[in-house]
Amino acid sequence: MPRLAQILIDEELRTDEGGGSRSRAAVRVCAKLQRSLSVLAGVAGFRSVLIRAVALAKVEAPWLSELQISPVGVVILPPELEEQLGEAEASRGTALLIRHLTDLLITLIGEGLTLRLLQDVWPKAVLSGSGKNKKKSL
C-alpha cells in the first residue's frame, strides 16, 4: 500500500488545521493515529510501533532520529529542524515515517482492521474499494 501515506497526508492538507506544509500535515496524521490507536493498543503500544517506524524510516532519512516523541507518542517536528531541512526533505522524511507506520499496522493487525481504523479517522478518504467516484485508491 505505497500510496496510503500520501492519501492520509493529502487528507490532512485538505483540512489545513495547523499549517499548509506537507511535513506538518504528516505530523498531524501521526497525532490523529496516536489518539485513535492508543485506545486500541494503549499509549505504550502505540509509542512502541511509532518508535519502530522511526527506526525503519531513518534508514532513508537519517534526520528522523532528531524527531522528538513525547511519552504519550506524540511526534514533535521542531520548526528549526524543518527549516534547516527545507520543505522537500522534511516532507519526504515525514511521508516515509507515515508509510512505515501504516505498514507496521497492517503487519500487526491486518489490512482490513487498519483500513477500518483509518477510515474512522478520515471518513472522506478513499482508502480501498472500487467505487466510481474514487479520486484516489490504493
Image (tube, grey):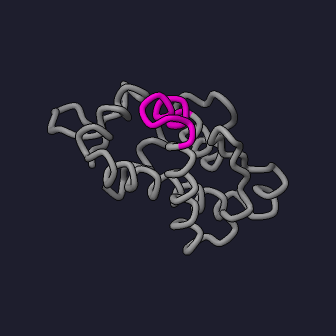
Q: What residue is at 74 percent from the left and 62 percent from the top?
A: 66
User: Of 7 and 76, which appears nearest the observer?
Assistant: 76
> Does residue 68 show up magenta in the picture?
no
User: Of 4 and 19, which appears nearest the observer?
Assistant: 4
Q: What residue is at 65 percent from the left and 38 percent from the top?
A: 72
Highlighted magenta segment, given as a residue range: 32-44
Image spot of residue 41 (x, y percent): 45, 37
Image spot of residue 43 (x, y percent): 56, 37
Q: Is residue 123 above or below residue 45?
A: above
Image spot of residue 117 (x, y percent): 36, 32
Q: Which of the 4 quarters of the picture holds residue 114?
A: top left
Image spot of residue 120 (x, y percent): 37, 25
> Does residue 42 show up magenta in the picture?
yes
Q: What residue is at 51 percent from the left and 58 percent from the top?
A: 53
User: Of 1 and 112, which appears nearest the observer?
Assistant: 112
Q: Quadrant of the N terminus?
A: bottom left
Image-based side of 86 in relation to 72, left or right: right
Q: Which of the 4 quarters of the picture holds residue 2?
A: bottom left
Q: Which of the 4 quarters of the picture holds residue 64?
A: bottom right
Most extreme residue toward the right is 80
Image-based side of 134 in relation to 43, left or right: left
- Give the overall secondary structure of the magenta segment: helix
Q: What residue is at 60 percent from the left and 48 percent from the top?
A: 22
Q: Is residue 67 above or below residue 131?
A: below
Q: How many marks?
A: 0
Q: Is residue 47 above or below residue 65?
A: above
